[in-house]
Image: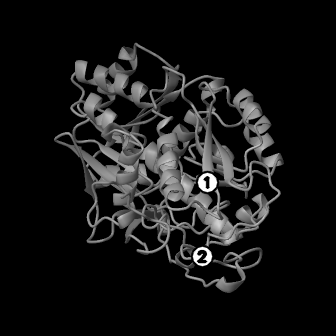
Amino acid sequence: MRRLGAVLVAALMVVAACSNTDDDDGGGSGGPGESASYADVTTERDDENVPVDQPGVTDDEIRVAGLATLTNDLTNGNFGDIFSGVSAYFEMINQNGGIYGRQLVHEEFDDQLLNAQAAGIELLESEPFAVVGVATSGLAGASPDLVAAGIPVFGWNINQEFDHQRTFFGTRGYLGIGQQPNELVPWLGDEAGLSTLAVLAYGGAAAVQSQVCQQDIVDGIEQFDSAVELGFNDSSLEFGFADVSPQVRQMVDAGVDYVATCMDFQGHATIASEMQRQGLEAVHWLPRAYDPRFMDDFGDLFAGSYVHLMMLSREFEPRPPAMDAFEAWMAETGAGDEQLNELALAGWISADMFVTGLRIAGPDFTREAVIEGLNSLTDYTAQGLTPVIDWTREHDEDANGCQMLLLIEDGEFVPQFTEGDQPYVCVLPGEDGALEVSHEPIQHEDVGLIEMPE
């Protein structure tokens, strides 16, 4: 189960399938009942312009929308950086002729923290062809209307609403929040020689997702064979809390040496600062910290802690050409080094998924053809930037789950548990609650979608 707070990591067999459609007829690879290969899709013809009667589409443009939490001071999540990644990818496509004779146009919508329903209504009224670039703390209000409208949606899926929806495509694949216990936290604790875990989450009706994440971690500690024990468990803190001294005192008394939260940057940092004040030394598990600004602000505070990432990190070598292209086009569109983070990578990957869907659908593309085409794809990788995603399965089960783990050391993200060209660690339950580990290599093709700026 791939998710923010509970990450099921399993071994993967890559299934490669060929297209049943000839390139000469101008159609895309795959379709309903067929399977498509990502490597084949990246070489599909995309220069033919034919009339298309779809929302957001004219003879010379394809207009899409993005939805992110932009105007809030609570989560400190830099959610808007997902738009930078989308824009960088679209600029790469547009400068190289667009797709099907059309330029890609991106309109941004702000959900203002937890007001996704109102923002979703405004977005729907704009009639985009697709939604590309979603990064929001709360998607429940908008998702029913997006599903009912049959709009393909692409984004950084920290939300339960991405699961079990054939029209939603998350950069992390299947999440499964609240459906299976977290294997990674107990396994990592054992690897790091830790013994006593504290789990903290936000309380209140507006933070159900945080609490479900917390429960997944607790279930993992209780169900899997691990030396890690649960020493403290709390979900009483509200967004924007300032005082966590009582909780930390209890953590000290419990002998905590390992901390996991289902919180944003600011919440976790407030806890870590109080821990430092009270002299509590512990290793943190950080599921949302892959960000240069986080490192600048909090690197010293979290030295020796682990960041997990559901995509390839920029620090891993050897890197695929797509990573160089991501960095180059981010610079080309004016993004600074501080924006080279998980959210921007998620935007780039979201845009790649969308363009891949267009290529499978062919020049007479429709929303439904994009959705059906992607759902036939068995080996999606964003040209090496994600573990392999099998979209014939990833809406309802975790067909992969592999991820990267990074150690915060001397102000840097340092990849851990890697083997050669295998950056991803894959933890899965074995017999009798034991946990087993395997690795997955980078999968990419040096062809097709990726172009460097001149």
For the residue pair 93 and 348, the one nearer the viewer reads as 93
Mark identifier at residue 391: none
At horizontal 50% and vertical 35% (from top left) the residue drawn is 79
Note whether 413 is above or below 98 in the view shown.
above
**Image quarter of the C terminus:** bottom left
Q: Are marks 1 and 2 in contact (CB under 8 Å)?
A: no
| Residue with the mark numbered 2 | 44
What coloring was used for the rendering? one colour
Work out how far the residue at label 1 is from the one at label 2, CA to CA, in angstroms: 17 Å
Which element type, helix, strand or loop, lies under badge 2? loop
User: Does residue 218 appear to the left or right of 63 in the view shown?
Assistant: left
Q: For residue 26, say whether it is visible.
A: yes
Q: Position of residue 327 (x, y in %)?
A: 35, 52
At horizontal 53% and vertical 52% (from top left) the residue drawn is 90
Please tell me how crowded label 1 is: few (under 14), some (14-19), or many (20+) other residues with Cα within 10 Å.
many
Which element type, helix, strand or loop, lies under badge 1? strand
User: Does residue 384 appear to the left or right of 366 in the view shown?
Assistant: left
For the residue pair 448 and 314, the one nearer the viewer reads as 448
Given the image, on which type of amino acid does mark 2 rest? Glu
State which mark lies toward you, 1 or 2: 1
| Residue with the mark numbered 1 | 103
For the residue pair 319 and 335, the one nearer the viewer reads as 335
Q: For residue 22, say whether it is visible.
A: no
Q: Position of residue 409 (x, y in %)?
A: 19, 44
User: Does residue 428 appear to the left or right of 115 in the view shown?
Assistant: left
At horizontal 28% and vertical 55% (from top left) the residue drawn is 191
- Residue that lies at the very extreme toward the left in this rendered image: 410
Q: Position of residue 88 (x, y in %)?
A: 46, 49
Please tell me how crowded label 2 is: few (under 14), some (14-19), or many (20+) other residues with Cα within 10 Å.
many
Note whether 432 is above or below 205 in the view shown.
below
Note whether 197 is above or below 424 in the view shown.
above
